[in-house]
Structure formats: C-alpha cells, structure tokens
Image (tube, rainbow, N blue to C red):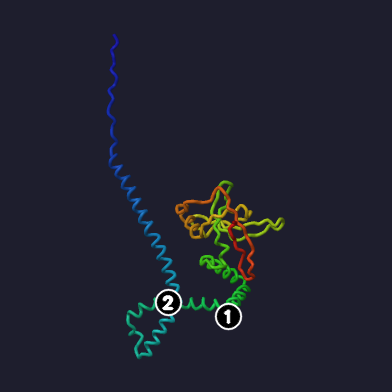
Amino acid sequence: MAKMHSPPESKPPIQERGTPRRGLWVALRALLRTRIFAGLATVIPLWVTWIVVKFLFDTMRSATQPMVEQAIEWLTRSAGRQPSAIPAYVEWAVPVVAVLLTLFSLYLLGLLTANVLGRRIVILLERLFEGLPLVKTIYGSTKRIILTLAGGDDSQQFQKVVLVEFPRPGMKCIAFLTSVIEDADTGRKMATVFISTTPNPTTGYMQILPLEEVSETGWTVEEAVKVLMSGGILSPPKIPFDRVHPLRWHQATVSDSAAPRPVTQS
C-alpha cells in the first residue's frame, strides 16, 4: 500500500539581514542631499551677487583711488605732517571716496553728452573709431550690448520677446526680435530673431523667418531671461501658445532714430 506523503511545511520567509540599516542609510542620504541642495540654493546666489558687486566696486575704486590717495598725501604734507601719520580711518575711507568720485565723474560725463556740444564730441569720437577696423567692431558691439541692458532708446529693437516654431513645427521656443528686413525678390517682411539657449541666454542661434509667423508674448526681457536661466521653472502662469499674435512693423519717421521699432497689431 502506497505511503501518503504530506506536503512540505512552508517555512517563514527569511528576513534579509541589514534591511533596517539599509533603509536608515537611504533616508539619511536623501535627507543630506535635500539639505545640501537647499544650502547650495541659498549660498550660490549670494556668492554670485557678491562676486558681481565686488567686481563693480573694485573697478570703480581702481579708476580714481590713485587720485584720491595723491590728494590726501598732498593735504597731509600741506598741513606739515608726514604721509605715515595719516589716521587709519582715513585709509579705510579712501576706497569709498574713490567709488563716489567715480560715480560723480560718470554723472558729469553723462551730463556732458546730454547737451549739444558733448553730443558732437561723442559723434566725432565714434566716427574716429569707425575708421579703425578692429576698434570699430569692439566699440560698436559693446555699445549695443550696454544700451540693450540699460534699456535705452537705441535698444528698443531688442525689447520684444516672441515665440517662434523651432526646431520643428509644433514646438515653440522663446526668441528676441532684433530687426525686420524685406525679401529682395518679393518684398515680403522677414523677421530676424535671436533664439537663446538654456541656461545661458547669451548664446544661441540667429534665424530669419516670415514676420507673420512670429508670435507676440507680452513678456519683458527680464521675464524671458528668468525663464531661460531657470529652465522653465520661473515661467509665467500663462503663455499665448496655440494662436499666433502677429506683429506689425513700421519705419520710424524721425530722421535720427536708430532703427525701426515694433508695435503690436491692434
């Protein structure tokens, strides 16, 4: 008679060794990563701001500090004292006075160029620079960048933030409208746009496309730069994506105006 074999008893699962320790290490690593990134998000903007402010301060200080030091030395000798007897608080005040003197000099220079005589002097200097091949390129590009960042009248052509289809239909990217030109054969209006890259908006592509395919956004340059540098994290809540909001371009009527300026179509 065959023997009945009872089914093997099921054994309880063996717990892996070190599971609580491994879970604790994962949680600790996640906590450290979160706190470290939070610290970096706090420190890096402060550090970059400090570097930029320090660079500007040192640049303005170095422009006039030798003049301020010579003036203090002359005043000290005129008072019958040796330069080594200058108080410490005066030496600490020299950089601040130098920066204030630089700012005052820049103000006087701007005031000079605002009148007719100063403007003529600037025009003569620009014509002199335009006659030099390498200097012409450096001076013209630097002036255009400064005017663009400062928001001057000559930079209005750079103050339009638009959307264009790139790199394929159905995908749109942020671009800056720079100028409008005409097709040599048909007279069709064409837009030249600068498509910035992320996270560095100073590099990108220059594209030429029909003006009717350029869509108005209503954003400011600052808002567009924030979106580009953050990779879209700091995007505005709404964007005109599906419909194209066309631009209308007209030639400026003032004879001495810098360039044609864009206006939105009513």
Residue highlighted by disc 2: 100
Rendered image: mark on residue 226: none
Q: Residue at x 28, y 32 (%)?
A: 14
Question: In this view of the protein, which residue sits in the foreground, 188 or 42?
Answer: 188
- Label 2 is placed on what type of residue? Leu
Coordinates of residue 262 in the picture (x, y in percent): 59, 61
Foreground mark, 1 or 2, reads: 1
Callout 2: helix, strand or loop? helix
Question: In this view of the protein, which residue sits in the foreground, 186 or 252?
Answer: 252
Coordinates of residue 26 in the picture (x, y in percent): 32, 45
Q: Is residue 59 above or below residue 243?
A: below
Tell me: 212 left or right of 15: right
Residue highlighted by disc 1: 117
Coordinates of residue 71 in the picture (x, y in percent): 41, 84
- Label 1 is placed on what type of residue? Leu
The answer to which quarter of the image holds residue 1 is: top left
Q: Which tag, 1 or 2, sits closer to the chain's start?
A: 2
Q: Residue at x 44, y 70 (%)?
A: 56
Residue farthest to the front, as pictured: 266
Mark 2 neighbour class, 10 Å CA radius: few under 14, some 14 to 19, many 20 or more: some
